[in-house]
């Protein structure tokens, strides 16, 4: 867990009534198009405290990437205002950029024909980092992030995980007080992801404020002081991981794996005491999670629904609630499900 934060301090990031609309056009015939307004963000309000690791969770299309792009001046909001490090995102855009280290596009944010080291020198120069400091910072990043084996090769020869490591180093090159990391471990192996999380914790202990998005609930639970869950452009929950999980303290979680028919799923969802049933994936294996009030009362109806409809069950287990179960209860689906009407 991250370091304690001062809740009485002035927020380092403040979002007030921010909305963002997109216009989409769908061809309806040879000469006719349907125009539709998609609300990516709906008058969103948010405060992030100095020294906080703040988790931002939501399915694809929920609005989290739109919010991040607004906070990093890549998008202008349709309405509302936001302050980052006491700078207005529209009026003081250059100051905002200097105050934020970003890892938003992962490997796509690097120049592939340059070596990893040349990329770090280039971005350090773009941020006007003094040369002596830049050289020392690059050597430090190479050592801490364990980049020695590949840093002097062209980026186009890197694996996806190696590209993500250098993209992370790029976000740190100008020593900004705020870091925004969008799915930083998505292409990394277990060891590399663990190392990145260790560095994130170290940077946070040194005082950096970090916004962290991830599809890995265990990662969010381990790192974040607070977590906001965004769905359909709105924040539907915001609290510490512990308090969010406590919302399910009266509920039971049943995991079910096997060949389950649609009719069986419909009947299980209609059992008295069942809040929700969603398909989730972990380590490449799919199973269903059933959130219910009392598993002892639900299990007889569950077994009847399975046997009556010819479904085949491999396993049934009762588990302690997790942050992922909170997400399912609040949104009615797992984090991996896509709600996109228009790509973020």
Image (cartoon, helix red, strand yellow):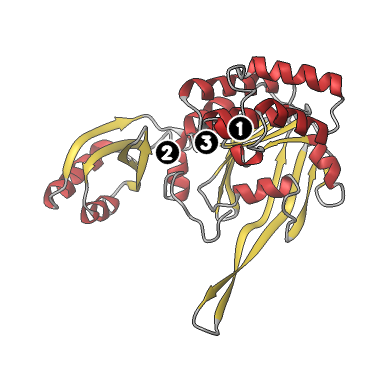
Q: Mark 1 points at which residue?
A: 155
Residue 17, image quadrant:
bottom right
User: Label 2 near label 1: C-beta < 8 Å?
Assistant: no
Quarter the N terminus occupies: top right
Residue 309 shows up from this direction: yes
Query: In the depicted view, which residue is nearer to us: 218 or 126?
Result: 126
Q: Mark 3 points at which residue?
A: 244
| Disc number lying in front (3 or 2) | 2
- Residue 121 x, y percent position in the rendering: 76, 28
Dot 2 crowding, Cα within 10 Å, few <14, some 14–19, many 20+: many
Query: In the depicted view, which residue is nearer to us: 274 or 82?
Result: 82
* Numbered mark located on residue 341 in the image: none
Query: In the depicted view, which residue is nearer to us: 307 or 187?
Result: 187
* Numbered mark located on residue 325 in the image: 2
Residue 294, image quadrant:
top left
- Residue 2 x, y percent position in the rendering: 63, 23
């Amino acid at each position: 867990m991250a370091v304690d934060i001062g809740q009485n301090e002035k927020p380092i990031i403040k979002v007030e009534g921010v909305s963002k609309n997109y216009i989409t056009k769908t061809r309806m015939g040879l000469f006719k198009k349907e125009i539709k307004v998609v609300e990516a963000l709906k008058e969103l309000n948010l405060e992030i405290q100095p020294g906080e690791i703040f988790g931002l969770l939501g399915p694809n299309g929920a609005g989290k990437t739109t919010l991040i792009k607004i906070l990093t001046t890549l998008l202008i909001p349709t309405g509302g205002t936001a302050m980052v490090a006491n700078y207005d995102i529209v009026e003081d855009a250059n100051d905002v950029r200097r105050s934020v280290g970003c890892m938003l596009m992962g490997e796509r944010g690097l120049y592939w024909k340059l070596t990893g080291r040349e990329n770090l020198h280039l971005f350090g120069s773009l941020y006007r980092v003094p040369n002596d400091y830049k050289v020392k910072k690059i050597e430090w990043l190479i050592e801490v992030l364990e980049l020695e084996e590949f840093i002097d090769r062209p980026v186009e020869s890197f694996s996806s995980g190696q590209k993500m490591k250098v993209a992370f180093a790029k976000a740190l090159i100008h020593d900004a007080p705020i870091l925004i990391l969008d799915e930083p471990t998505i292409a990394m192996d277990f060891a590399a992801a663990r190392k990145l999380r260790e560095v994130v914790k170290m940077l946070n202990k040194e005082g950096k404020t970090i916004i962290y998005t991830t599809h890995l609930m265990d990662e969010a639970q381990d790192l974040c002081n607070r977590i906001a869950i965004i769905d359909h452009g709105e924040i539907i929950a915001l609290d510490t991981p512990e308090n969010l999980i406590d919302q399910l303290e009266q509920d039971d979680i049943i995991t079910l794996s096997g060949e389950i028919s649609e009719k069986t799923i419909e009947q299980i969802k209609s059992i008295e005491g069942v809040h929700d049933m969603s398909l989730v994936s972990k380590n490449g294996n799919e199973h269903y999670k059933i959130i219910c009030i009392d598993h002892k009362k639900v299990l007889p109806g569950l077994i009847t629904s399975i046997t009556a409809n010819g479904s085949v069950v491999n396993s049934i287990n009762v588990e302690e609630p997790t942050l992922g179960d909170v997400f399912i209860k609040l949104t009615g689906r797992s984090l991996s499900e896509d709600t996109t009407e228009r790509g973020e």
